[in-house]
Image: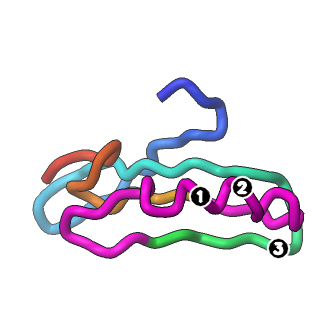
Amino acid sequence: MTDSNEKMIPIETPSGKFNVWTKRIGNNPTIKLLLLHGGPGCTHELFKNFENFLPAADIEFYYYDQLDSFFSDKS
């Protein structure tokens, strides 16, 4: 992770403590969107094309990789 808008969020599950990856794009105090990919096997990369139009519409959005996906911890 190199972007300052990327963050690892700690979570606790019955299997232990893990971190899930998020990344914020934009800054809008009233309009926020959380992009949730399906699984298993998908990642936030599915939504990369949103960077082409959501910022232009002034929509703040968050990428998220669920546990066991791409940048998030593997359980």
Residue 27 image offset from top left, x and y in percent = 83, 54
Nearer the N terminus, badge 2 or badge 3? 3
Residue type at the position of mark 2? Asn
Badge 3: how crowded within 10 Å, few (<14), some, or many (20+)? few
Which residue position is annotated with label 1? 49
The residue positioned 43% from the left and 48% from the top of the image is 21
The answer to which of 58 and 1 lies nearer the viewer is 58
Residue 34 image offset from top left, x and y in percent = 59, 70
Which residue position is annotated with label 3? 31
Horizontal relation, residue 33 to residue 10: left or right: right
Q: Quadrant of residue 62?
A: bottom right
Pointer 2 with pointer 1, Cβ within 8 A? yes
The answer to which of 13 and 52 lies nearer the viewer is 52
The residue positioned 45% from the left and 43% from the top of the image is 8
Residue type at the position of mark 1? Asn
**Magenta residues, start to end:** 37-62
Secondary element type, mark 2 = helix
Q: Quadrant of residue 71?
A: top left
Residue 6 among magenta residues:
no
Badge 2: how crowded within 10 Å, few (<14), some, or many (20+)? few
Which residue position is annotated with label 2? 52
Secondary element type, mark 3 = loop
Residue type at the position of mark 3? Ile
Q: Is residue 75 above or below residue 7?
A: below
Q: Can you tell which mark lies on residue 26?
A: none
Horizontal relation, residue 51 to residue 43: left or right: right
The residue positioned 87% from the left and 73% from the top of the image is 30
Secondary element type, mark 1 = helix
Q: CA distance from mark 2 to mark 3?
A: 17 Å
The residue positioned 29% from the left and 47% from the top of the image is 70
Q: Quadrant of residue 53?
A: bottom right
